[in-house]
């Protein structure tokens, strides 16, 4: 596990491509674990009701995770393998 270059960063940038890699601090891991639990619970409860609600809930959850990564992660940009 690597340490972030900037204090307060939970999700470091990926080395290649655009986006964020795995969390580097416990807070990031807690957010990710909670996100997975809520996603699986919501999908399980919503799927029998209506598949449209299932898809909308999943999209909302992805948007929430994106916002958390954007706020608590390194600034996203395309990377070509620099350290």
Image (cartoon, rainbow, N blue to C red):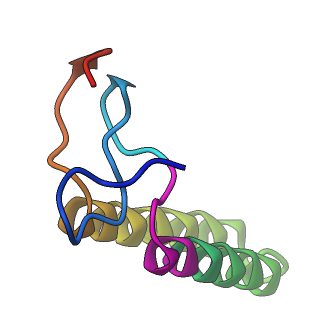
Q: Is residue 27 above or below residue 56?
A: below
The magenta segment is 22-31
Q: Is residue 28 highlighted in magenta?
A: yes
Residue depicted at x 14% and y 47%: 75
Q: Is residue 39 above or below residue 5?
A: below
Q: Dividing the picture into quarters, in which one does residue 36 lie?
A: bottom right
Residue depicted at x 33% and y 49%: 12
Percent from the top left, x then y, of residue 15? 36, 26
Residue depicted at x 75% and y 75%: 40
Residue depicted at x 48% and y 59%: 23
Percent from the top left, x then y, of residue 57? 54, 74
Q: Is residue 51 above or below residue 12?
A: below
Name, please, the residue furthest toward the top.
Answer: 80
Q: Is residue 25 highlighted in magenta?
A: yes
Percent from the top left, x then y, of residue 59? 47, 62
Percent from the top left, x then y, of residue 53? 60, 75
Count of numbered labels shown in the rendering: 0
Q: In the drawing, does residue 61 fall left or right of residue 17?
A: right
Q: Main secondary structure of the magenta part?
A: helix
Q: Nearer the viewer, residue 24 or 63?
A: 24
Q: Dividing the picture into quarters, in which one does residue 16 lie?
A: top left
Q: In the drawing, does residue 6 fall left or right of residue 64?
A: left
- Quadrant location, the C terminus: top left
């Amino acid at each position: 596990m690597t340490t972030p270059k900037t204090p307060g960063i939970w999700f470091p940038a990926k080395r290649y491509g655009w986006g964020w890699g795995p969390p580097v601090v416990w807070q990031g891991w807690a957010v990710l674990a909670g996100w997975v639990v809520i996603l699986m619970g919501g999908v399980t409860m919503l799927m029998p009701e209506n598949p449209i609600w299932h898809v909308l809930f999943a999209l909302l959850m992805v948007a929430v995770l994106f916002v958390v990564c954007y706020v608590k992660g390194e600034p996203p940009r395309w990377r070509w393998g620099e350290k």
